[in-house]
Each structure stands twice: as structure tokens, then as C-alpha cells.
């Protein structure tokens, strides 16, 4: 199996490339985005609820999660962050975090300053559009999580989560033969799915016996994706990975031609 750490390079540009047609220069800028790299050990908060967020950041390696802790100590994991994910695009509007973000594995991230973000929004229209699509995807994932917790049974919840992670990892080229890293404990899965660790173990064993998956050494192999998607009633459309509509592509082509024409006119004068 391919080295997942090495293949995470360029994950942000690969992810955003599903939302808008990026130029070669756009990709180069995104691949070098960030002022400096920071490293966090597993099970450490990157930013805690109530803290003033320092900056937006891009996750480059590892896996993190957003979570809330209830007053009685119970935890709800809200969503997972994988290479290429941004946290948080609107961070400069917040006075304090309303949830926590923690590293589930050792992670590497790059901080993005306000100036960098504003420059992208103004000077790189394709990147700006892709970032808006990325925000739409995050919102759609949260809606789907509500549906899953409210209406799917235990098998459906687990199957849905595995299918979503498969599609998200595929979008950044970190899947090989329906195989991807799943460095989660059964307690972390339970806190995500609203189940107990014992129930999660029971569902995993059942799906394994039915020949649908293999989970060994923190590596998940989905042997029967079609059946898992059927169990979850999973439709990947909410992830918006089909690419930009044709009219959007034509818009950016016209915009690019206008910019080139404007530069040529300026140089001629």
C-alpha cells in the first residue's frame, strides 16, 4: 500500500480542484500556502473551546477532529479533518471558539494569515470560488451527520461514516483499492456515532463476518462498497465532488481572457 504520509502533499489543491478549475499558478500557490508548519502530538488540542483562534490553518498530515464536551464529561465528535482540510475559513470573524479541535494522530498543519487569505480572495478568483465550495461541502457534511444520528441505525451510521471517509480520501488521492488509513479507536468511533464502544465493536464484527470490510493495523479495507452504501443509503452528491458546472468553467475562462487582455493593454500603454 502507498505511503499515506507522502501522498498527503498537495492535498489542498487536489481537494479544491474538485470545486473549481484551478490554474497551474493557483495550484502552486495553494501547495505553498501557510506561513510556517506546526506539529501536534496525538490527543492534544489544537485549539480549545473558548479560546481566541490564532489563525486559519491547513491540515497537511494526520487526522484531527472537531468536538464538544458536555458538562457531564461526555464527548461528541462532530467531524473529522483530513489532509487538505481548512480550519477555519471564517476564523477572523470569531471572538472565541464554540468547539474544540484536537489531533487524533500526530499532525502537521500550516497557519494561514489574514493577509494571505484576503489576498487569495481578491487576486485568485478560482481559488476564492473553490474555497466557497469547500465551505458548502462542510455545511453539507454537517447536515448529513444530523440525518445520520437522527435516522440511521447503528449499521447505517457506521457504513455512512466509512463511505464518506472513502470518498473524501479518494478526492485527495489517498485511497488505494478501497483501502485507507483509519487511525480511530472504537471509543472515538462511538463518540462520533452516538453509540457505545461495545455496540461499535459488535457492528464492526458483524460487517467483517459478512465480508464487507477488513480493519487491521489502523488500515480499513472496504471489500463491498456497494453493499455498505446500500446499508447507509449513501449518496455522495452532498460532497460536491463532481466538479464545477460547465457554465462556471466558461465564466472563469472568460475572466482569464479579460485579465490577460487587461494586462496586454496596460503593457502596450
Image (cartoon, rainbow, N blue to C red):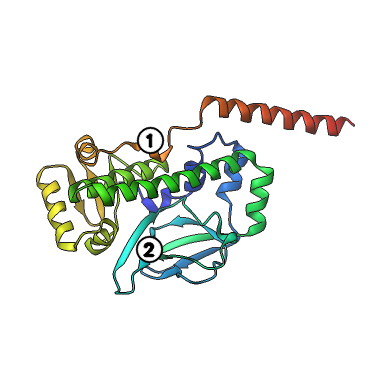
Q: Is residue 204 left or right of residue 173?
A: left
Q: Residue furthest left?
A: 209
Q: Looking at the image, which residue sits at the far front?
A: 150
Relative image position of residue 35 (x, y in whole percent): 61, 60
Q: Residue 237, which numbered label?
A: 1
Q: Which residue is mark 2?
A: 67
Q: Residue furthest bottom?
A: 72
**Residue 195 lies in quadrant:** bottom left
Residue at 39%, 39% (x, y): give it: 238
For residue 10, say whether it is visible. no
Where residue 56 appears, as percent x and y from the top left, is 55, 59
Secondary structure type for disc 1: helix
User: Would you call the spot at circle 1 few (<14 residues within 10 Å), some (14-19), or many (20 or more)?
Assistant: few
Say whether marks 2 and 1 touch (CB < 8 Å). Answer: no
Measure the alpha-carbon separation of dots 2 and 1. 25 Å
Along the polypeptide, which appears first: circle 2 or circle 1?
2
- Residue 93's place in the image compared with 15, above or below, is below
Q: Position of residue 110 (x, y in %)?
A: 53, 59
In the picture shown, does residue 23 fall above or below 204? above
Amino acid at each position: 500500500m502507498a505511503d499515506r504520509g507522502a501522498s498527503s502533499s498537495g492535498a489542498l489543491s487536489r481537494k479544491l480542484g474538485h470545486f473549481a478549475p484551478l490554474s497551474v499558478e493557483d495550484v502552486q500557490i495553494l501547495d505553498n500556502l501557510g506561513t510556517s508548519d506546526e506539529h501536534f502530538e496525538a490527543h492534544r488540542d489544537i485549539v480549545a473551546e473558548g479560546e481566541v483562534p490564532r489563525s486559519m490553518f491547513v491540515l497537511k498530515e494526520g487526522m484531527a477532529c472537531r468536538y464538544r464536551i458536555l458538562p457531564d464529561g461526555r464527548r461528541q465528535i462532530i467531524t473529522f479533518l483530513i489532509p487538505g482540510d481548512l480550519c477555519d475559513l471564517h476564523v477572523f470573524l470569531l471572538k472565541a471558539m464554540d468547539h474544540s479541535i484536537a489531533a487524533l494522530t500526530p499532525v502537521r498543519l500550516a497557519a494561514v494569515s489574514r493577509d494571505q487569505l484576503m489576498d487569495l480572495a481578491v487576486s485568485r478568483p478560482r481559488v476564492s470560488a473553490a474555497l466557497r465550495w469547500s465551505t458548502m461541502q462542510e455545511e453539507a457534511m454537517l447536515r448529513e451527520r444530523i440525518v445520520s444520528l437522527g435516522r440511521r441505525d447503528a449499521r447505517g451510521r457506521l457504513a455512512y461514516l466509512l463511505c464518506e471517509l472513502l470518498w473524501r480520501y479518494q478526492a485527495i488521492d489517498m485511497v488505494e483499492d478501497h483501502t485507507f488509513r483509519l487511525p480511530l479507536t472504537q471509543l472515538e468511533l462511538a463518540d462520533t456515532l452516538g453509540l457505545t464502544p461495545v455496540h461499535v465493536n459488535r457492528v464492526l464484527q458483524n460487517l467483517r463476518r459478512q465480508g464487507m470490510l477488513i480493519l487491521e493495523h489502523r488500515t480499513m479495507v472496504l471489500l463491498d462498497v456497494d453493499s455498505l452504501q446500500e446499508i447507509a443509503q449513501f449518496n455522495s452528491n452532498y460532497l460536491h465532488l463532481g466538479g464545477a458546472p460547465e457554465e462556471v468553467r466558461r465564466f472563469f475562462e472568460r475572466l482569464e481572457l479579460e485579465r490577460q487582455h487587461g494586462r496586454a493593454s496596460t503593457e502596450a500603454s
